[in-house]
Amino acid sequence: MADLCNALSAARAVPAAALDADRVLGPLPQVRPAAGDGTCTAFGGGVEHPAPVEATFADSAGRAHARRWPHRQSGRSAVGEHTRRVLVAARAVHDGGPAAAGPLSAGGG
């Protein structure tokens, strides 16, 4: 999955992250500044606290599933062998970003 996101990022010039959708408390993560009281599970298992105003992809429980846009993903929602549903999040807020980012698909389209 990391290879797919890296390929999408390179092809579209937008950072992308893949999240295990079943590990994100819905309805969908929000791209928003951290409030300073949220958490992010590091890949090593430790808990980090995103700094206030840091851009995060946060769920309704305040857990950050990606930080600093999608550059640092959470170990909590990392895609793995038991993943059934994947949510790909891309940052494309620059001029022309929506056209550059979509539609994203594994089929290259």
Image (spheres, grey):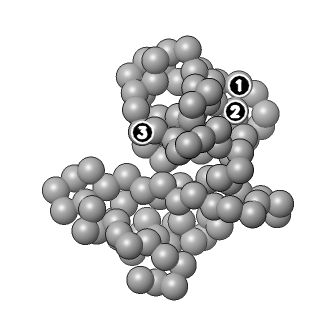
Location of residue 73 by image quarter: top right
Which residue corresponds to mark 2?
41
Asked whether, in this view, residue 81 is left or right of residue 50, the answer is right
Q: Position of residue 75 (x, y in %)?
A: 71, 42
Q: In this view, does 12 lie above or below 35?
A: below
Which residue corresponds to mark 1?
47
Q: How crowded is mark 2: few (under 14 residues within 10 Å), some or many (20 or more)?
A: many
Callouts 1 and 2 close, C-beta under 8 Å: yes
Q: Distance between the residues labelled 2 and 3?
A: 17 Å
Q: Name the residue located 46 percent from the left edge and 38 percent from the top edge.
A: 30
**N-term mark: 3 or 1:** 3
Q: Residues within 10 Å of mark 1 (few under 14, many from 20)?
A: some
Tag 3, which secondary structure?
Answer: strand
Q: Where is residue 15 in the image (x, y as percent from the top left)?
A: 42, 56
Residue 75 in view of the camera: no
Q: Position of residue 107 (x, y in %)?
A: 51, 85
Location of residue 62 by image quarter: top right
Name the disc covering residue 62, or none. Answer: none
**N-term mark: 2 or 3:** 3
Q: What residue type is labelled 1?
A: Val
